[in-house]
Amino acid sequence: MIVQKLPLPPFTEETARQKIQMAEDAWNSKEPERVSMAYTPDSAWRNRNQFINGREEIVQFLKAKWVKEIDYKLKKEYWAHTGNRIAVRFEYEYRDSSGQWWRAYGNENWEFDENGLMQKRFASINDLAILESERKFK
């Protein structure tokens, strides 16, 4: 059975923005299994200095991420698209186990298969320590 994740490529600006909002909603759910279903079974990621392959590794990565990144809240923004690719700018905030708040900034490049599942995700991310009073996302 072929699984499709609408909208499908080639993307218009409108459908690229829909895909971005769907991703933001899924990541903010902090449900690793839900997030993983947007990716191909053999999806390849580069996330900072980590290389992650396949849904099982995605789930394990996200479980560990959300244990360390407490009160995680993400906002993604459209940057560009073409064909089966979307570029995204994002920010997210979290606190660590010591109570220090962080804001992470970055860019992601996404590539989708013909069924609308993400087959490649390349993320470049930088973290900035912030005061709780500087939070944007509450």
Image (tube, rainbow, N blue to C red):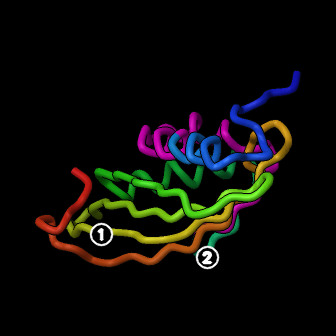
- The foreground one among 116 and 30 is 116
Checking the image for residue 28, the label placed there is: none
For the point 17% across and 68% down, which residue is it?
Answer: 134
Q: CA distance from mark 1 to mark 2?
A: 18 Å
Q: Quadrant of residue 4?
A: top right
Which type of secondary structure does the marked residue at label 1 adopt?
A: strand
Residue 3 sits above or below residue 88 on the image: above
Circle 2 packing at 10 Å, graded few (<14), some (14-19), many (20+), is: few
Query: Residue 28: percent from the left, percent from the top?
Result: 42, 43
Asked whether, in this view, residue 98 is left or right of residue 77, the answer is left
Q: Quadrant of residue 91?
A: bottom left
Q: Quadrant of residue 70?
A: bottom left
Circle 1 packing at 10 Å, graded few (<14), some (14-19), many (20+), is: many
Q: Which residue is mark 2?
A: 49
Q: Nearer the viewer, mark 1 or mark 2?
A: 1
Asked whether, in this view, residue 9 is left or right of residue 2, the answer is left
- The foreground one among 105 and 14 is 14
Give amino acid for label 2.
Answer: Asn
Query: Residue 9: percent from the left, percent from the top?
Result: 78, 43
Q: Is residue 30 magenta?
A: yes
Magenta residues, start to end: 22-47
For the point 50% across and 73% down, which residue is it?
Answer: 125
Q: Which residue is mark 1?
A: 102
Which type of secondary structure does the marked residue at label 2 adopt?
A: loop
Residue 50 sits above or below residue 27 on the image: below
